[in-house]
Image: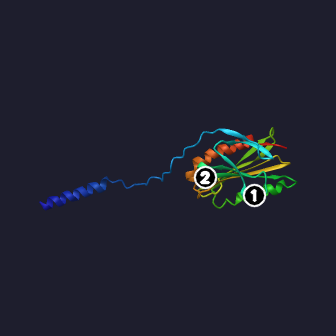
Amino acid sequence: MFKNLKTLLLLFVIIVISSCEADYAPKPRGYFRIDMPVKNFQLVDSIPAYQFESPEYAVITPDYNSAQEENWFNMEFPQFKGSLHISHKKIENNLPVYLEDMHTMLMQHLPKATAITDSLIVDKERNVYGLLFSIQGKRVASPLQFYLTDSTSNFVRGALYFNIRPNNDSLKPVIGFLREDIDHFIETLEWKD
């Protein structure tokens, strides 16, 4: 009786082992679903040098780290824990210096970046020219940066940052969503002078 039981148990073990698939792959890590707000825009003309349209869910705050600069501000996105930092400088025969500073700040992200792509911005009608940089990489601190200029008087620089530890794989939907807002900012920016 025990011999039949041993044979039956051995047969059961062989069937179980042979029925298991050896190519087991763990499932990828899941992330929480992020609900995106409806896109509605409002005109912001309180900045002395330029005006633009901002999404209604964004909060415009002064840049407290640069209180002496009247044209510097942050476009806060509280539900995403992100900020678009915007700075402005008057051009006084120093546009190459500002462009070099922009590229120096951009290159600080190079160690964490897997790719940097740029998009040319040319709008002759509004006299707006510049570049928008998309910085790919899992641990990149600022995934989107840009500069805009009229090439004679105004230079605007923007950089998107999140107030959390960067993991751009999980932030990808938010970065794409905010990219549309940055594109809208660029498309609606108008110089006041």
Identify whether 42 is placed above or below 71.
above
Front-most of 96 and 179?
Answer: 179
Q: Dot 2 lies on which element?
A: loop
Residue 65 shown left or right of residue 176 in the figure: right
Q: Quadrant of the C terminus?
A: top right
Residue 20, given in percent of the width and then of the height, sits at 33, 54
Q: Crowdedness of circle 1 by 10 Å Cα count: few (<14), some, many (20+)?
A: few
Q: Dot 1 lies on which element?
A: helix
Q: Which residue is mark 1?
A: 66
Residue 44, given in percent of the width and then of the height, sits at 73, 42
The amino acid sitting under disc 2 is: Lys
The residue at 30%/57% (across/down) is 17
Question: What is the quadrant of residue 50 in the picture?
Answer: top right
Residue 153, given in percent of the width and then of the height, sits at 85, 49
Residue 35 shown left or right of residue 51 in the figure: left
Q: How far apart are labels 2 and 1 at the CA level?
A: 21 Å
Q: Residue furthest right?
A: 93
Q: Which residue is mark 2?
A: 81
Q: Marks 1 and 2: in contact by CB < 8 Å?
A: no
Label 2 vs 1, first from the N-terminus: 1
Front-most of 159 and 35?
Answer: 35
The amino acid sitting under disc 1 is: Ser
Residue 57, given in percent of the width and then of the height, sits at 63, 44
Q: Which mark is residue 124?
A: none
Residue 75 shown left or right of residue 126 in the figure: left
